[in-house]
């Protein structure tokens, strides 16, 4: 993955590294902007622990998560991250999610980063199906994934305990054959 450079005009996408912690903390610690996220760090040490202990050093290892940094090419600013869960139930399926600094939302960066990552998962890693788990209240994420061609497959009522509250979960999916 060290040579992972997806086809993207404005972005570099690479694995998170320890020196990314300050940038990650800047946008991930905003509890209002990330209210639909399962992980909101409260200290910079939470981010360091996440990068060094929760992210797999290996890509494509079943049962692990890998986190990619989304970096603007023009100023080398880390503006978000993409999480990929390599599922244990099926080596040809992955779960994907994206978090973008609110200062950079609405500019097409998430779409561009996800397109590059989806192409990487289908073309380089040979995945067949990608899913996204989305809180139904998170309309911007739903619209983003629908624009990318994902379709709603399921709506589970009060199936996830998120920040002390039982919330619904919607699963969106995209098959390799459906990818443009």
Image: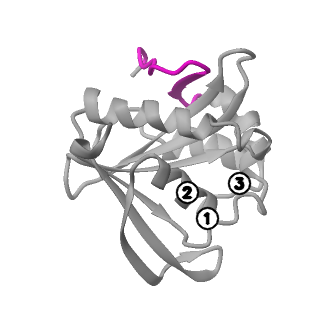
- Image quarter where the C terminus lies is top left
Q: Which residue is mark 1?
A: 139
Residue shown at the point (38%, 37%) measured from the top left: 118
When the figure is inspected, residue 88 is found, relative to residue 179, above or below; the finding is below
Q: Residues within 10 Å of mark 2 (few under 14, many from 20)?
A: few
Closest to the camera, between mark 2 and mark 3, is 2
Range of magenta residues: 2-17
Q: Is residue 5 magenta?
A: yes
Q: Could you tell me which secondary element the residue under label 1 belongs to?
A: helix
Q: Secondary structure at mark 2?
A: helix
Q: How many marks?
A: 3
At 54% from the left and 33% from the top, the residue drawn is: 112
Mark 1 closeness class: few <14, some 14–19, many ≥20 residues within 10 Å: few
| Label 1 vs label 3, nearer the camera | 1
- The one of 94 and 152 positioned closer to us in this rendering: 152
The residue under label 3 is 41
x, y percentage for residue 46? Answer: 68, 49
Q: Is residue 161 magenta?
A: no
Pointer 2 and pointer 1: residues touching (CB < 8 Å)?
yes
The answer to whether one can see residue 59 in this image is: no
Mark 3 burial class by Cα count in 10 Å: few <14, some 14-19, many 20+: some
In the picture, residue 19 is in which quadrant? Answer: top right
From the image, give the main secondary structure of the stretch colored magenta.
Answer: loop
**Which mark, residue 143?**
2
Task: Tell me which label, 2 or 3, sits earlier in the chain.
Answer: 3
Image check: 153 left or right of 98? left
Residue drawn at x 70%, y 59% is 34
């Amino acid at each position: 993955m060290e040579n992972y450079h997806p086809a993207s005009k404005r972005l570099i996408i690479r694995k998170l590294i320890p020196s990314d912690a300050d940038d990650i903390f800047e946008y991930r610690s905003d509890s209002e902007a990330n209210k639909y996220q399962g992980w909101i760090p409260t200290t910079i040490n939470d981010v360091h622990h996440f990068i060094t202990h929760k992210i797999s050093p290996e890509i494509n290892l079943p049962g692990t998560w890998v986190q990619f940094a989304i970096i603007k090419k023009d100023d080398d600013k880390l503006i978000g991250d993409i999480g990929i869960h390599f599922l244990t139930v099926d080596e040809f399926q992955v779960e994907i999610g994206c978090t973008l600094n609110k200062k950079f939302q609405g500019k097409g960066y998430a779409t561009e980063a996800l397109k590059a990552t989806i192409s990487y998962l289908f073309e380089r890693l040979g995945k067949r199906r990608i899913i996204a788990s989305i809180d139904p209240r998170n309309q911007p994420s739903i619209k983003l994934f629908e624009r990318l061609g994902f379709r709603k497959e399921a709506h589970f009522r009060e199936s996830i305990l998120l920040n002390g509250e039982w919330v619904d979960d919607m699963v969106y999916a995209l098959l390799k054959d459906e990818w443009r």
